[in-house]
Image (cartoon, rainbow, N blue to C red):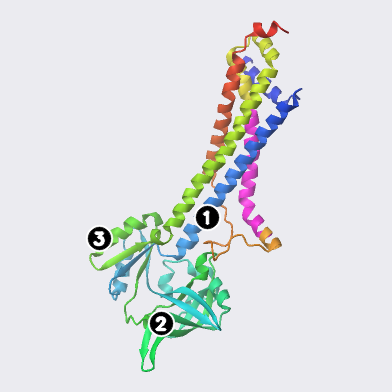
Amino acid sequence: MLDRIPFLIGLRYVRAKRRNHFISFISLTSMLGLMLGVAVLILVLSVMNGFDHELRSRVLGMVPHTRIEAQNGMTDWKALAERLSQREHVVGAAPYVDQQGMFSVGGRNEGAMVYGIKPDYERRVSIIGDHMQQGSLAALAPGEWNIVLGDLLARNLGVGVGDRVTLLVPEASITPGGVFPRLKRFNVTGTFKVGADLDANLAYANLEDMQTLARMGDAVGGLRLELDDLFRAKEETQAILNELGYGYRGMDWTFTHGNLFQAIQMEKRMIGLLLMVIVAVAAFNIVSTLVMVVTDKHADIAILRTIGATPRSIMGIFIVQGLSIGVIGIAIGVALGIALALSVADIIAWFETVSGIQFLDPNVYFISYLPSRLNWSDVGTIVAAAFGLSFLSTLYPAWRAARIQPAEVLRYE
């Protein structure tokens, strides 16, 4: 029963209406600060996790995890693709011919990267087949000069399925009439949308058509490889190059999108650290609250000491009071943060629809919407850190209360 006394008195101090309203205000401020700090921290880290996940699943689902190329083109790509597919960490291999060019339609010009692919192979290394908005990759038959455009690229050009576009490549053709840029008209047979900047600068055509346009004969530009773990890309690329020997070169996704991924990770850590300062400030307010409560409760503490309460029990009373403020603020903050993290994408989408403002322009950012992915380990870390700061904030006021001498206090009562 005696062990419950500090707990019960501490809770009573939390519920009691204090004569000093300023103390109540500071307690409420501490609670609100913890609530907002925890909620915002959960929300922001969930958004950063969302960006990280979208980068991995969408952008890195479209770009190759690694590419293997030969210096003078790759003519034996079928045998090499079969050989590399047998490696432990290689999920699939697909040939490609890449060509930087400019699309021109009715006075509109847009630059883009055009990949020549084999549709049946491409499904092994890319998610493009799952994000077709119109048409399908199967329409990219050899000799028909069909092409699939990114949704934003098609809109910028003002074309749709059934229209024709002209592709100009940065290579000249010498004719009796002079030197002219090489160009070819394609039929638009489909569009894709992955919700990333790739929608504005990427197109797919048939491999044999692009070989003809690039005058490569039977050679391809290289092989795209899909790995079971994208973070093994650098070491796996090096291992493949060591196995193949001289004449081959490789490039993994860290060369093209590695800086973006590292920036997201760095921003997540820095934002988490900065927002934790908000929690620390709110927890520090608990110190102010308890110090004033200790001053206000000098007589109560002295009476408790005279009837047998130990310094440890007195410390327990104010630790319970401070932790009660912290736990309530943390609990409400966790509930609010989880609710916001699960609904922020819908909230932002609704606001964009109502206001007509687009927060993430896909021409600037790598995705066009605000993603959110709740990570329960992050929530646990935030709760543990906030609770720890709250507990540390109670130690000094509780220690100060335990040092009060009953005789000195009661002498003037």
**Disc 1 residue type?**
Phe
The residue depicted at 47 percent of the width and 50 percent of the height is 265
**Disc 3 residue type?**
Asn
Q: What secondary structure do most residues of the magenta stretch adopt?
A: helix
Residue 160 on the magenta segment: no
Residue 158, placed above or below residue 258: below
- Judged by depth in the image, the label closer to the viewer, 1 or 2, is 1
Q: Quadrant of residue 412?
A: top right
Residue identifier under label 3? 242
The residue depicted at 47 percent of the width and 57 percent of the height is 56
> Helix, strand, or loop for circle 1?
helix
Q: Badge 3: how crowded within 10 Å, few (<14), some, or many (20+)?
A: few
Residue 135, placed above or below residue 24: below
Residue identifier under label 2? 209
**Disc 2 residue type?**
Asp
Quarter in which the N terminus is drawn: top right
> Helix, strand, or loop for circle 2?
helix
Q: Which residues are magenta?
A: 323-350
Mark positioned earlier in the residue sequence (1 or 2): 1
